[in-house]
């Protein structure tokens, strides 16, 4: 993918959101971990006439107000891979971790307003111990809507002497979000974690065994398997990872399930 300097600001990106569905995803370029954005222009909106263009904004500690980037135009008959470390290498000299919002546009696309390309993220490490593929989370319209039912579940939370779970959380809103973590066993026992907060338009990554009092022991009678419940003031974007602390491998990533039922 040919690099291109930012030619549009955050305001121009916000204007695109009125007509295009943007997606949010975790991005990391630090400690030997890297991120690559993959677009597969073949989902609901296959358009062989093209061309299409990628517009994205990075939010991290180094650029809390957002750092925009726009790709060159490319054809719809080929997949597009964007190495995010190379994209932002000139603007950000230091390692970074945060999240991106991304829109893929086509000036000749007829299916407006909610059309998008299939977007996935590759996460890999220099030592080969992490190879993950995660989906993006789609938003609709120019304003991020806070979805009803402020709970998310990770059924199959896994924590034992060898495997430790991580939670990646993204807050795409313009205000801070408070949240509480609860671990549950298959027989209904609960352990409540602390109430925490994630700042506006920010990202955090948590080792879950450090957020509870002896999570390994709490799940020991159930082969290290339980459920994680997240209650938050707004519906944030969450992914999970599983780290093998013996081998150092990181695997098992996906986004969490949004829960719309009765109170858990």
Image (cartoon, rainbow, N blue to C red):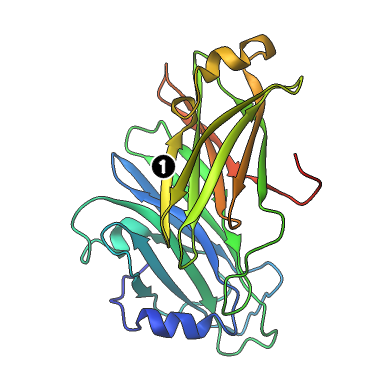
Answer few, some or many: residues within 10 Å of disc 1's Cα (few below 14, many 20 plus, some between 14 and 19). many
Of residues 73 and 187, the one drawn nearer to the viewer in this rendering: 187
Q: Which residue lies furthest to the top in this view?
A: 221
Q: Residue at x 62, y 45 (%)?
A: 231
Q: Residue at x 71, y 54 (%)?
A: 149
> Which image quadrant: the N terminus?
bottom left
* Secondary structure of the residue carrying numbered label 1: strand
Q: Whole-percent x and y of residue 100?
A: 43, 62
Corner quadrant of residue 114 = bottom right
Q: Whole-percent x and y of residue 118?
A: 61, 64
Q: Whole-percent x and y of residue 7?
A: 32, 83
97, above or below 161, in the image: below
In the image, is 56 to the left or to the right of 226?
Answer: left
Q: Which residue is drawn at 57% across and 80% down?
A: 142
> Which image quadrant: the C terminus?
top right
Corner quadrant of residue 176 = bottom left
Q: Which residue is drawn at 40% across and 69% down?
A: 57
Of residues 237 and 54, the one drawn nearer to the viewer in this rendering: 237
Residue of label 1: 124
Of residues 29 and 165, the one drawn nearer to the viewer in this rendering: 165
């Amino acid at each position: 993918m040919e690099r291109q300097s930012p030619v549009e600001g955050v305001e121009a990106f916000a204007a695109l959101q009125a007509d295009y569905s943007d997606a949010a995803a975790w991005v990391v370029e630090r400690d030997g971990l890297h991120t690559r954005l993959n677009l597969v222009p073949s989902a609901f909106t296959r358009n062989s006439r093209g061309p299409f263009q990628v517009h994205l904004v990075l939010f991290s500690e180094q650029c809390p107000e957002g750092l925009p980037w726009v790709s060159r135009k490319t054809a719809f008959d080929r997949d597009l891979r964007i190495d995010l470390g190379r994209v932002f290498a000139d603007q950000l000299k230091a390692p970074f971790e945060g999240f991106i919002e991304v829109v893929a546009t086509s000036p000749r696309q007829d299916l407006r307003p909610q059309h998008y390309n299939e977007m996935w993220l590759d996460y890999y490490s220099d030592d080969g111990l992490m190879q993950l593929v995660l989906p993006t989370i789609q938003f609709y319209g120019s304003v991020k809507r806070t979805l009803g039912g402020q709970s998310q579940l990770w059924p199959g939370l896994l924590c034992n002497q060898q495997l430790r779970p991580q939670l990646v959380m993204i807050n795409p809103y313009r205000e801070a979000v408070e949240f509480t973590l609860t671990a549950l066993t298959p027989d209904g026992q609960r352990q409540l974690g602390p109430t925490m907060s994630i700042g506006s338009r920010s990202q955090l990554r948590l080792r879950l065994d450090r957020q509870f009092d002896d999570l390994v022991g709490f799940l020991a009678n159930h082969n290290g398997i339980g459920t994680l419940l997240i209650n938050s003031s707004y519906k944030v974007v969450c992914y999970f990872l599983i780290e093998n602390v013996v081998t150092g491998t990181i695997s098992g990533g996906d986004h969490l399930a949004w829960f719309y039922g009765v109170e858990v």
